[in-house]
Image: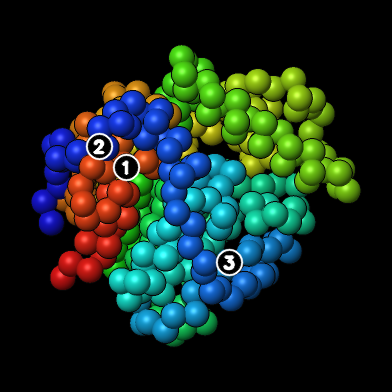
C-alpha cells in the first residue's frame, strides 16, 4: 500500500458547508438503529473492569470499535457504524473505555488519549473468546488516537489485519488550544461539563486521590493538568500531551490503516494534519476539504454519511 495525503473528493450537503454544521448535524438528526447486542463485563488484571458489547451476528471477521472523549455505545457514530458493519457482514464489538458505560469504574484512574493497555487487553480477550484476533479495529477521535498509538507501538507484531481511524487529534496540544478559539468553544463547554460531572459521579462513593475543585477547571489544559495527568502517572498536561499524541507513532505503523480526516475539523488546526513524510507506507490517508469532526454529511446519493462507506470499502477490499 502506498501512503497518500492528498485532498480527496467529498461533496458536502449544500446546506451543511460549515464545519460546525457538519459536526453537529449528525448528533441531532442522524438516524438511530436498534442493535441486538450481548453485554459483557470484562474483568481486568488490576481489579477494574471494562464493559463491551457484542453483536449477535455470526461472522469470522470481528471489528472492534473505540469511541471518542466521553462517548459511549449511545453515540450516534457508534450506533450507526455498528449497524453498517453488521449489514456488510462483519461482527462489530464495541469497547467502552473505563467509566464510560454509565457505570463508574472501581479504581481512581480513568481513561485517556494514550491508554493502549486496555485496548491490548480486549484484543487478547476477543482472541480467547472467539479463537482469533479481531479482523480490524475502528477508532473515532480520542479512540482513533489510542488506536494509532497502539498500532505504532506494536509495529509488525500488531495482530489486527486492518484499522481505520476517523477525525483523530494527532497532536493533543493542538486540540486543547483549538477548542479555546471561536465557535469551537461550544464543544469545549459541552465536553468539559461532561468531564466534570463524570469526575463528581465517580468520586461520590470513593475518596479522590486529588485535591482539586473540578468545577473551577474551564479548559482542557487545566483539566488534563490537574486531573488526567496526575491520575495516570504524568507530571502534567505537557508530558501527557507529548507522550500520548499519535502523530509521532504514524511512521511505525505496519498494519494496513486508513485515516479519514477533514482539513476543516473544528477540533484542531489544519497544521495538525501530518505530512506525507510522517506516514508509513501502510497508511492510506483520506483527507477531505470539508467534513467537520466525525461529520462528513454528503450530498451524494449513496449515503448521507460518507465516512461509513469509506470504512466499509476499506475493510472489504482484498
Q: Is residue 235 left or right of residue 301?
A: right
Residue lying at 19% horizontally and 40% vertically, measured from the top left? 10
Query: Quick one: quadrant of the C terminus?
Result: bottom left
Circle 3 or circle 2, nearest the eye: 2
Q: Where's residue 18, x and y in %? A: 33, 26
Circle 1 — which element? loop
Circle 2 — which element? loop
Q: CA distance from mark 3 to mark 1?
A: 28 Å
Q: How many marks?
A: 3
The answer to the question of whether label 1 and label 2 lie on touching residues, with beta carbons closer than 8 A, is: yes
Q: Where's residue 20, x and y in %? A: 40, 28
Q: CA distance from mark 3 to mark 2?
A: 33 Å
* Closer to us: 179 or 83: 83
Image quarter of residue 214: top right
Image quarter of residue 52: bottom right
Residue at the disc numbered 1 = 297
Circle 3 — which element? strand
Q: Residues within 10 Å of mark 1 (few under 14, many from 20)?
A: many
* Closer to us: 148 or 235: 148
Q: Is residue 176 left or right of residue 155?
A: right
Q: Where's residue 118, x and y in %? A: 56, 59
Q: Where's residue 248, x and y in %? A: 34, 38
Circle 3 or circle 1, nearest the eye: 1
The answer to the question of whether label 3 and label 2 lie on touching residues, with beta carbons closer than 8 A, is: no
User: Residue 12's mark?
Assistant: 2
Q: Residues within 10 Å of mark 3 (few under 14, many from 20)?
A: many
Residue lying at 37% horizontally and 82% vertically, measured from the top left? 59
Task: Judge whether residue 272 can be spotted in this image.
Answer: no
Residue furthest toward the top?
182
Is tag 3's residue or tag 2's residue first in the polypeptide sequence?
Answer: 2
Residue at the disc numbered 3 = 52
Amino acid at each position: 500500500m502506498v501512503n497518500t495525503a492528498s485532498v480527496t473528493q467529498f461533496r458536502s450537503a449544500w446546506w451543511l458547508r460549515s464545519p460546525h454544521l457538519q459536526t453537529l448535524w449528525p448528533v441531532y438528526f442522524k438516524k438511530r438503529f436498534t442493535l441486538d447486542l450481548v453485554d459483557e463485563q470484562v474483568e481486568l488484571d488490576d481489579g477494574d473492569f471494562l464493559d463491551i458489547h457484542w453483536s449477535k451476528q455470526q461472522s469470522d471477521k470481528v471489528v472492534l470499535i473505540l469511541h471518542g472523549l466521553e462517548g459511549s455505545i449511545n453515540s450516534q457514530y457508534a450506533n450507526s457504524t455498528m449497524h453498517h458493519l453488521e449489514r456488510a457482514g462483519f461482527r462489530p464489538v464495541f469497547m467502552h473505555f473505563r467509566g464510560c458505560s454509565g457505570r463508574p469504574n472501581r479504581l481512581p484512574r480513568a481513561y485517556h488519549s494514550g491508554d493502549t493497555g486496555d485496548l491490548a487487553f480486549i484484543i487478547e480477550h476477543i482472541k480467547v473468546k472467539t479463537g482469533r484476533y479481531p479482523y480490524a479495529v475502528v477508532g473515532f477521535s480520542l479512540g482513533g488516537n489510542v488506536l494509532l498509538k497502539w498500532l505504532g507501538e506494536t509495529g509488525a507484531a500488531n495482530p489486527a489485519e486492518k484499522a481505520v481511524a476517523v477525525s483523530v487529534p494527532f497532536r493533543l496540544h493542538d486540540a486543547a488550544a483549538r477548542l479555546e478559539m471561536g465557535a469551537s468553544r461550544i464543544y469545549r463547554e459541552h465536553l468539559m461539563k461532561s468531564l466534570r460531572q463524570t469526575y463528581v459521579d465517580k468520586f461520590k462513593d470513593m475518596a479522590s486521590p486529588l485535591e482539586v475543585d473540578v468545577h473551577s477547571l474551564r479548559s482542557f489544559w487545566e483539566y488534563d493538568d490537574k486531573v488526567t495527568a496526575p491520575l495516570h502517572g504524568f507530571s502534567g498536561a505537557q508530558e501527557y500531551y507529548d507522550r500520548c499524541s499519535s502523530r509521532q507513532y504514524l511512521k511505525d505503523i505496519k498494519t494496513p490503516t486508513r485515516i479519514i480526516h477533514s482539513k476543516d475539523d473544528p477540533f484542531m488546526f489544519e497544521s495538525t494534519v501530518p505530512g506525507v513524510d510522517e506516514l508509513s507506507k501502510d497508511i492510506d490517508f483520506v483527507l477531505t476539504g470539508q467534513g467537520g469532526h466525525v461529520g462528513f454529511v454528503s450530498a451524494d446519493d449513496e449515503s448521507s454519511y460518507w465516512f461509513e462507506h469509506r470504512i466499509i470499502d476499506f475493510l472489504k477490499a482484498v
